[in-house]
Image: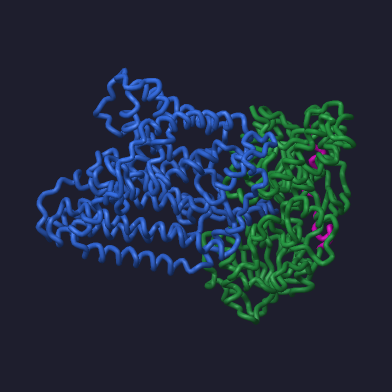
Chain colours: A blue, B green
Amino acid sequence: MLHKSKRLLWGMLGVILPLPAFAHPAEQALVLLLPTELYTLGGTLAVLASIILISLVPSSGLAWLYRGFRIGKACDLGRAPFVTSGLATGLFFTLLYVGINGPNDPQSNLLPQVIWTGWWVGLFVLQGVAGDLWRWVNPWSGLCALLFGRDAPVLTYPARLGAWPALCIFILFQVFLLADIAPSDPDRLATIAFLYWLFTFVGMALFGPAIWARNVECFSVLFGLISSLRVVHCAKEMRVGLPGWASFSLAPLDMARALFCLAILVSGSFDGLRETFWWLGQIGINPLAFPGRSAVVWTSGIGLILANIAIICLYAACVQGGIYLARRFGTLAQVPFSIAFRTYAITILPIALGYHFAHYFVSFLVQIQYLVATMADPLARGWNLFGLGGFRVTTGFLNSTEGVKPILLMNVGAVVISHIISIAMTHHLSGRIANTRRDLILIQLLLSVLMIAYTIFGLWLLSTPRGA
Amino acid sequence: MSNGTSKKTGLNRRTALKGMGAGALLATGALPGSLGFAQAQSSAPIKIGFQKHATGIGAAYGRWYDATTQAAVKRINDMGGINGRPVEIVIEDDGTDPKRGAEVIEKFANQHEVDVAFGTLFSHVVIGSAPRAGELKLPYFVVSEGHHVASGMLNRYTLQPGITDVKSQVQSMAPFVANNLGKKVTMIFPDFAFGHDHRDFFSAAIEAQGGEVVAKIAVPPAETSFTRYFPQIPRDTDVVYHVMVGPAVLTFVKELGEFFGPSRPEIFGFIDSLEAVDINSPGLEFLEGTYFWEGHPRHAQKDNSEYDTAYRAAVGVDDRGASVSDPKDVSTYAHMFGCWETLNVIKAGMETADYQGPADRAKLIEAVEAMTDMPHSLDHPQGAKLFNGKTHQVFGSQHISKVTDGTLTVEHTASIEDGMYEDEVDYTAQSF
């Protein structure tokens, strides 16, 4: 009896990307034909070489490169970000309307497309490389400025809570993203998005927009951290520097933000890990017969929490171990672990950004086409807005090695470069703690080993077979 | 709440829109000289719920099932709809998940109030959804190839009239393999239920043809390199029959080619391994000279039927089975015809039953159960079919193609009879 359908053949070729997942059969099969071991070896050697090279650079030299060079005057934009934020509020509610009243197919509905593809994937990356776009397009600040102006908040935010609520909400968001069985369903997404908007709006109304955004609104915290990585910053004056140069002013972070940095990294890493044959084997699922998201709700949710704990412990052990080595075999004076941990945590951000890019890149290339196509007719009324009615989605670039190879190499590049940036940041920050070259090397020795291991892990994720 | 009509397809979006737009105009009698929908007792559209794998592991396939569905509906509406009423497709994403699939069936029945549900591909989603469709008394037309319909494990409300099942496909391969490729077959299959089914059934089928399976090589599902299994292939093997699946399937075929070199046995597999893959892609040269089962030949043949040609044009697929707008965008051509043919069966069934609304659902199922011959036509561009009303399963011809100079060239077409087997259920004996 053939109770199993040959459909299995198809599915087993597919890859699932986390959210509004796009599965493509050919892409991964073709990746496995490429010499991925060489890419992993090359990437790892590049990271190792960068560790050696950077450790030879005098602290003063690196500090000079990281100081940020003035390239222009301050750009006073006045209330423009509030105006665009107000417009974004209008757009947000328009999207909710489309979510509820538009097509049920998430591939044809602007709400899941804009939220998952435009915002979560696209804006996240732009935030890290281009500018603080979230300040301009968040759907609260403009409305709050209009309604509340400079009025004193009704209630005082309990200072002892710090940014811990933001961390908790971000992890809940991750659980929704990874474990919900239909995170792209327009109705469901519209409901959740509205409830979160309302929760945030009420919080801002009661406690003040700025303090709520700084401590509870997890995406403002997230994008605030990520945007510190960009090379050009415009505050009192416009300055440019190496990626991450402006992040140093944030270090040491408070503990909630320090853990937040690690949580961002874990979200991208675990999302990739849980699709692999290895993970599916750990949770007892045949990687050639993935039964659907509903079968892995608990393992995904619990796995995410455990992955967070594991990475925090691992990172903490490397920081503490570095301090021990520099004290035991060097001349380092007593350094509080908490200070060191909260200082180094900011260096995780480039890797988190790199993983985010690599993890979603293939999905983005396809889904952004759906977004463009849907803009022509968001309510499925037969419109042809913006002349996009003839736009056709294609996945042809995933059907051949010529298309798949450059995409894979871009992802490899993102992972490797992000680690190199992180290594340079770590080296620079070590100068705040250690004075001698010997201490500098010793205190970051274990972190360097961790970087190499994580590079191998990241490149393995890009090339290992996935079954979910 | 939206009716969610799927007026969108990334592949043929504009033409689908035109079709639906024309349908709307026809409905209002605005187009002169049209067939019109005016004679219908009700001008309300016939709603067909399309359970689409828009996300999850089936998404790449859902995309082409969607494109084919849109093209079929456009054609039906251009011809005047069903019983004088336009057809409207209501899409819900099942996430390629059985639990979500059952939720979608409920939404179809209770929220969208569709007339029938349609289009499910992956077996586990069909198996998860069919019981709910039965409870809600919602006719559920699947396009999954699964044997679960004909095996009797589902219910009277679930039918598969547009695509043959895997049992039939595997069985119909045996005569050609035994008579043309060789009698001594080594089977290589993944070591779980799916592979075991192939092993057991094909073994019986090839023995009935005077052949024998000289080795059965089970490969653990998580394996991604296969070279160490190849020495187990007996030297006197004529044919290697593989049903390897998963992301490593191209690696498998490549390593097999490298292992044997030029003096290899014949190699036979299923095109599913290469669905949506450009077989002329660099690195896939080892496919040359190997054989594949194809439900519907991807590459237009020299003697291509007018129906297949017209079907390709309607869906927006070229002679190589790729999107007309991007020759690299290869479709899931071997299977997606099932959506087209199923919708035409629904149309024919509704017309026979004079279907007016949900109260006539039982009449619709009885009308489909009464169907037998489905001639090769534009309604059935893959080929003639024979429907078995008792098992709710259609039977049809199968194709074996050989990769020749980078083209899948049909070497053999198995007859409908080659794929037929004894009934395992009589759904007509079940009450509504």
Determine the main secondary structure of the stretch shown in magenta: loop
Residue B230 at x, y percent in the picture: 57, 73
How many numbered marks have been drawn onto this rendered protein structure? Answer: 0
Q: Position of residue B278 (x, y in %)?
A: 64, 63
The answer to whether residue B98 is visible is: no
- The residue at 47%/27% (across/down) is A195
Q: Residue at x 34, y 66 (%)?
A: A46
Residue found farthest to the top: A154
Asked if residue B430 lies in the magenta stretch, the reply is: yes
Q: Nearer the viewer, residue A323 or A297?
A: A323
Taking the image as shown, residue B398 lies to the left or right of residue A357, namely: right
At 58% from the left edge and 59% from the top edge, which residue is drawn? A397
Residue B282 falls left or right of residue B13: left
- Residue A79 image point, x, y percent: 38, 30
User: Vertically, is A198 above or below B430?
Assistant: above
Magenta residue check for B302: no
Residue found at the very far front of the displayed protein: A73
Q: What is the magenta range?
A: B414-432
Q: Quadrant of residue A58?
A: bottom left
